[in-house]
């Protein structure tokens, strides 16, 4: 069947195995839509034949792409027509040395170059052009490269939920810096945070950290103007704007009122920018000089993002939210119309550059504080699996991101209808054709001011479930990605930036992915609730070493909440299932409580009788000790468990039915970590993992 052949050549799986182990087939119509979105039209017999012939020819020519990857252990192979056996090729190493390599004919129209023993991005001169040879180290940067102990620990925090006096109702980078110092003082080597990707400044109702406008820039709501102007002047500006009382009111709330808090924060940020501009009117101002250097260094990408923010505000005011709905001349970032808009709105564009500068400055300061306080790793950032198709990154990088498809998950035991996340993915065809420039740009942005990075849904390095626009999750198909190249590039960037990489490998993991992650030095994730064998919780010694252990994640219940069944209550209240479903879940949870406590007793972390279902706090200490005792190289504990909270940050599958991404910690970090129960829980981590 020609359509299936085209799909296979393009990396689209025409068949897939569902969670029951049954083979399913993608419909002809959906295959055509997905292939069409990949730039492979096949909606008629003639177009199918033409596209198939073109793709066959493209692959038969086997021309080397602009960037090829290799490992230190093995030489690089390629088509003999390009590597030309017997001819000496010039290789310029990244550090400037020049080598001559002579390809060896290995038959079948292929040739091999001997291994290059220095990691880096090297320039290889072919007969008619130059390509990049990216040589990856044996492994990316690991715990052994960063810490003096083989098993370290840290905390995980939802950045927006951190509190400090004067934060205006949203956790910011100043609160993060304060928290990092407190965590370092408690002995933590790392603090993992929720994504800090750029959102939509003009849309105050958008705040989900995993659905950003761009993964290249920062969420400006986390920027603190007081870090530039001082607390006293910033408070004075708030009073002048008439928003001081409202900001104070927002600070005391248990839940973030994102629309109101973002509107007021933007007013304060504009006032801060005006203040800086006034100071720049006379003698040179050091802060404004720093801002100008930042703008110059940011180059075309920073300017494009700032222009998008200004354009988006103007178009959104006219009820045109998605850039594809804008006038045609504004859909192209390089158009004369966009340039003219930027010229006429230079003050607004400059303001958005200022916002990025303030945010990036705050994140960089937080990581410096973490390292100065003695953390071996410091911040562990979070790279979302995709960005919104209507956002800045999709507008700026239209050639690199797939249009007309969104990332999701197929139907499974958790969601019978599957999941559609509404996020745009990088195109694997464009990645290879354009030298992985968009991937490297994004990865380097994520690694710029952190000591580690969690890659959300790392399964996407091998394959992604992509859904055609307008379809349901069940209409999707798996698209294959160049896993080996991506893994090598991640290992290389990890090595260059000396940053730990953690891959979120939860769910239905493709065969071989975890083994490949371990080879590349990426830590997998192991979550207490999921580490089971035939229903029983497995003993600590059986947890994988090359992983990060945790009690829970932002999408799962806290330890106290799991024990008390608060996640079951929340799903029932949100309409996820019937009362009968909830009753069955509660019955199963009672059995699970017994098995978990049995695992605690076997591990020697619990000696008291099993607490009642209502006493979730009593389960926290043994859960922490159990996870900390595993051989996993890194143990990360959510701050919710240190504080003994019931509610989880996010309930998957809900929007307004649950207060997702809105919960704030009950008090500032310096007070929270000094509470007796928090001190006792932190001491468990120190006892099991050090230092003492």
Image (cartoon, rainbow, N blue to C red):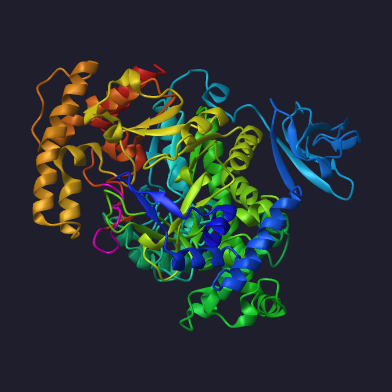
- Tell whether 238 sits left or right of 587: right
* Magenta span: 648-658
- Residue at the (44%, 33%) spot, across then down: 524
- Residue 520's x, y, as percent? 57, 31
- Residue 193's x, y, as percent? 43, 43
Q: Is residue 278 above or below residue 71?
A: below
Query: Which quarter of the picture shows residue 184?
Result: top left
- Residue 534's x, y, as percent? 23, 29
Total number of numbered labels?
Answer: 0
- Residue at the (52%, 66%) spot, across then down: 391
- Residue 431's x, y, as percent? 64, 53
- Nearest to the observer: residue 332 or residue 243: 332
- Nearest to the observer: residue 372 or residue 308: 308
- Tell whether 113 sits left or right of 87: left
Query: Which quarter of the picture shows residue 253?
Result: bottom left
- Image quarter where the C terminus lies is top left
Looking at this view, name the residue that lies furthest to the right.
87
User: Would residue 397 be visible to someone looking at this image?
Assistant: yes
Q: Is residue 611 above or below residue 601?
A: below
The secondary structure that most of the magenta stretch takes on is loop
Query: Which quarter of the picture shows residue 597?
Result: top left
Is 608 a magenta residue? no
User: Would residue 468 be visible to someone looking at this image?
Assistant: no
- Residue at the (44%, 60%) spot, across then down: 235
- Residue at the (47%, 69%) spot, across then down: 267
């Amino acid at each position: 069947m020609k359509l299936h052949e085209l799909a296979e050549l393009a990396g689209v799986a025409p068949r897939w195995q569902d969670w029951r182990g049954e083979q399913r087939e993608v419909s002809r119509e959906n295959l055509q839509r997905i292939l069409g979105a990949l730039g492979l039209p096949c909606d008629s017999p003639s177009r199918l034949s033409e596209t198939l012939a073109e793709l066959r020819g493209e692959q038969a020519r086997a021309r080397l792409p602009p960037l090829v990857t290799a490992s230190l252990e093995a030489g690089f192979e390629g088509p003999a027509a390009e590597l030309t056996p017997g001819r000496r090729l010039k290789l310029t190493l990244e550090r400037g040395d020049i080598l001559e390599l002579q390809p060896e004919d290995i038959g079948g129209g292929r040739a091999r170059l001997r291994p290059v023993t220095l990691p880096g991005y090297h320039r290889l001169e072919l007969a008619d052009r130059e390509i990049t040879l990216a040589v990856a180290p044996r492994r990316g940067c690991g715990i052994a490269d960063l810490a003096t102990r083989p098993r370290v620990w840290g905390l995980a925090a939802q950045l927006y939920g951190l509190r400090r006096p004067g934060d205006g109702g949203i956790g910011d980078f100043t609160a993060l810096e304060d928290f990092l110092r407190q965590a370092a003082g408690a002995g933590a080597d790392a603090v993992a945070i929720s994504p800090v990707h750029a959102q939509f400044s003009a849309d105050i109702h958008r705040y989900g950290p995993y659905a950003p406008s761009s993964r290249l820039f920062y969420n400006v709501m986390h920027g603190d103007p007081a870090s530039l102007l001082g607390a006293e002047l910033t408070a004075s500006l708030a009073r002048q704007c008439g928003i001081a009382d409202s900001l104070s009111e927002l600070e005391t709330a248990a839940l973030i009122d994102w629309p109101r808090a973002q509107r007021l924060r933007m007013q304060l940020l504009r006032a801060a920018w005006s203040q800086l501009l006034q100071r720049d009117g006379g003698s040179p101002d050091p802060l404004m000089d720093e801002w100008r250097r930042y703008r110059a260094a940011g180059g075309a990408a920073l300017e494009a993002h700032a222009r998008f923010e200004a354009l988006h505000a103007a178009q959104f005011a006219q009820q045109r939210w998605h850039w594809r709905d804008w006038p045609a001349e504004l859909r192209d970032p390089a158009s004369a119309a966009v340039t003219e808009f930027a010229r006429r709105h230079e003050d607004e564009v400059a303001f958005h550059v200022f916002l990025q500068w303030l945010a990036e400055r705050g994140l960089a300061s937080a990581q410096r504080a973490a390292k100065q306080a003695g953390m071996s790793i410091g911040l562990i950032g979070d790279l979302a699996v995709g960005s919104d198709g209507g956002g800045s990154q999709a507008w700026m990088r239209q050639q690199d991101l797939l249009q007309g498809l969104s990332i999701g998950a197929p139907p499974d035991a958790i969601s019978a209808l599957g999941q559609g996340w509404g996020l745009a993915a990088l195109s694997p065809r464009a990645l290879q054709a354009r030298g992985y420039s968009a991937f490297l740009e994004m990865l380097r942005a994520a690694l710029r001011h952190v000591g580690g990075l969690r890659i959300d849904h790392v399964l996407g390095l091998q394959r992604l479930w992509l859904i055609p626009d307008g379809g349901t999750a069940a209409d999707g198909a798996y698209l294959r990605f160049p896993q080996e190249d991506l893994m090598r590039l991640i290992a290389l960037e990890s090595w260059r930036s000396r940053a730990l990489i953690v891959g979120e490998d939860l769910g239905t993991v493709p065969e071989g992915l975890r083994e490949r992650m371990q080879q590349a030095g990426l830590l997998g994730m192991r979550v207490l609730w999921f580490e089971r064998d035939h229903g029983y919780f497995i003993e600590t010694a059986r947890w994988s070493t090359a992983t990060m252990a945790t009690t829970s994640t932002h999408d799962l219940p806290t330890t106290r909440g799991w024990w008390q069944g608060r996640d079951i209550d929340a799903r029932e209240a949100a309409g996820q299932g019937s009362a009968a479903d909830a009753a069955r879940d509660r019955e199963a949870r009672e059995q699970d409580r017994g098995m978990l406590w049995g695992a605690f007793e076997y591990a020697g972390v619990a000696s008291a009788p099993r607490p009642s279902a209502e006493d979730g706090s009593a389960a926290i200490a043994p859960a922490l000790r159990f996870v900390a005792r595993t051989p996993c190289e890194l143990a990360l504990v959510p701050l919710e468990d240190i504080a003994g909270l019931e509610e989880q940050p996010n309930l998957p599958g809900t929007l307004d039915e649950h207060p997702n991404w809105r919960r704030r910690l009950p008090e500032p970090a310096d007070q929270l970590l000094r509470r007796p129960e928090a001190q006792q829980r932190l001491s468990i981590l120190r006892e099991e993992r050090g230092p003492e």
